[in-house]
Amino acid sequence: MINITEQEIVDLVIEEVKGYFNSSSLDGNSSSKLDYPFIPLGVSNRHIHLTKETFEKLFGEGNEFEEMRPLYQPGEFASKHTLAVIGPKLRSIPAIRILGPLRKYDQVEVSLTDAIYLGINPPVVNSGDLKRAVALTLVGPSGSVYIERCAIVANRHIHMTNANAIKFGVVEGDFCKVRIGGEKGTTFENVLIRINDSWKLQIHLDTDDANAANVRDETYVEFLGKV
Amino acid sequence: MINITEQEIVDLVIEEVKGYFNSSSLDGNSSSKLDYPFIPLGVSNRHIHLTKETFEKLFGEGNEFEEMRPLYQPGEFASKHTLAVIGPKLRSIPAIRILGPLRKYDQVEVSLTDAIYLGINPPVVNSGDLKRAVALTLVGPSGSVYIERCAIVANRHIHMTNANAIKFGVVEGDFCKVRIGGEKGTTFENVLIRINDSWKLQIHLDTDDANAANVRDETYVEFLGKV
């Protein structure tokens, strides 16, 4: 008789499945190497950040901003809430998820594929840099709002700690190159280094980049040094 | 008094506009260098090839397959006809253009972004290689057809003549690397060399690749040699 709880069984199965994905390298895109120079990939799908004020305008005053599940970076989470956005072509993309916590700005991060569909020409910039951001209409269940400067394409970036930075030989603001192998092998330039000791090591690419290289999450990219 | 026809004025304006686009390098992605090692880019949006039999099934017997405009490669053209396709998620992509001339096979070339939207997992292969292609339903104005093996992601490839091949130091079937500079600088591996003396020098990337690098047509890519 083994003394094991249901939760422990669930955890064991999760670990086994994770291990399977990490070691599978059918297409050469996956790697079990967790160490330098390999960096875990997080694919950023289109998403939204909102201020408390805009959230209340779109969902109704008093409506609570609720977490659905935590994200990989500590403190970040997918909320239970989504919005539709509409651009100048009057086409809408429905059900874009709002990521928490609530921010000091309203921001819609899209891929260039989304931008072409919506009919906008957003700049490729850091999250939070809205000087050259372009307009979209955000529609929620209790209202809509036209925001002059909200839409951007987030630049490629790597989250890391100061300890990671020493290992990789980089400093905050450096631009680097990374490579993903396989059938659609691709090298990405101008990947920004962002440092914060509360972050886990992770590279963020958007869906255009990830789809160009034919990869999803559960992939590791190879760090090739500064540009 | 200048002796010039209306057509000559039109041609002059077209040349001027072309020259402007070729010389503009605001984002570092364009180049006026037409010579080695630079190759003109053609971005392949999703498209369809059909047999005469399938065309008649979808558009009605006796309906003529008509050209809308010629494409860059001699003999190839965009037809006047489009179809909707539907995958296992029962989402449709409307108005996918059929490219002519009619073929000996039915084929739907999509990006991985399209494939995820439709819920299919197509192989990355040469156009015409349908052994591992996956199923889609094609819907026309006069009928629909479920085709077991039709959907692929076309691989990256370069069309060139034998004379080009000598200059680039490659042979039919070689795999090469190319680079696009700029804000989202990207190097693409496993670009297949295809040779035919009737072709014009051109690299074909799909919309995922082009959007990852943030470029459209009117761009030149840099040939970096064999993989």
Image (tube, coloured by chain):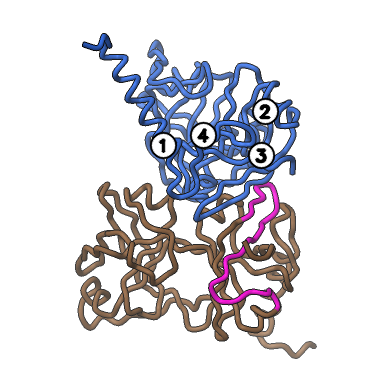
Chain colours: A blue, B brown
Q: Residues within 10 Å of mark 3 (few under 14, many from 20)?
A: many
Q: Which residues are magenta?
A: B167-187
Q: Are marks 3 and 1 on the same chain?
A: yes
At x 54% / y 67%, what residue is drawn? B192
- State which quarter of the image contains the C terminus of chain A: top right
Is B136 on the left-hand or right-hand side of B9? left
**Residue A51 in picture, x, y percent from top left:** 53, 19
Question: Is residue A146 a member of the stretch shown in magenta?
Answer: no
Residue at the image position 54 percent from the left and 82 percent from the top = B196
Estimate the spatial distance between the alpha carbons at disc 4 and disc 1, rounded to whole Å. Answer: 15 Å
CA neighbours of label 4 inside 10 A, class few (<14), some (14 to 19), many (20+) = many
Placement of A91 over or under B209, stated as above or below: above
Q: Find numbered disc 2 in the image and state the secondary structure of the residue it sits on.
A: strand
Q: Which residue is label 1 attached to?
A: A21
Sequence order check, earlier mark of 2 and 4: 4
**Count of marks, rendered view:** 4
C-alpha separation, residue under disc 3 versus residue under disc 1: 25 Å
Q: In terms of sequence position, does the residue under pointer 4 or pointer 3 come before the other?
A: 4
Q: Is residue A88 visible?
A: no
CA gap, disc 4 and disc 3: 14 Å
Q: Position of residue B70 (x, y in %)?
A: 49, 78
Q: Are marks 4 and 3 on the same chain?
A: yes
Determine the chain carrying the residue at label 3.
A
- Confirm whether the magenta stretch covers residue B184: yes
Q: Which residue is mark 4?
A: A42
Please say if the residues under marks 4 and 1 sit with CB atoms less than 8 Å apart: no
Q: What residue would you read off at disc 2?
A: A194
Marks 2 and 1 close (CB-CB < 8 Å)? no
Residue corresponding to mark 3: A191
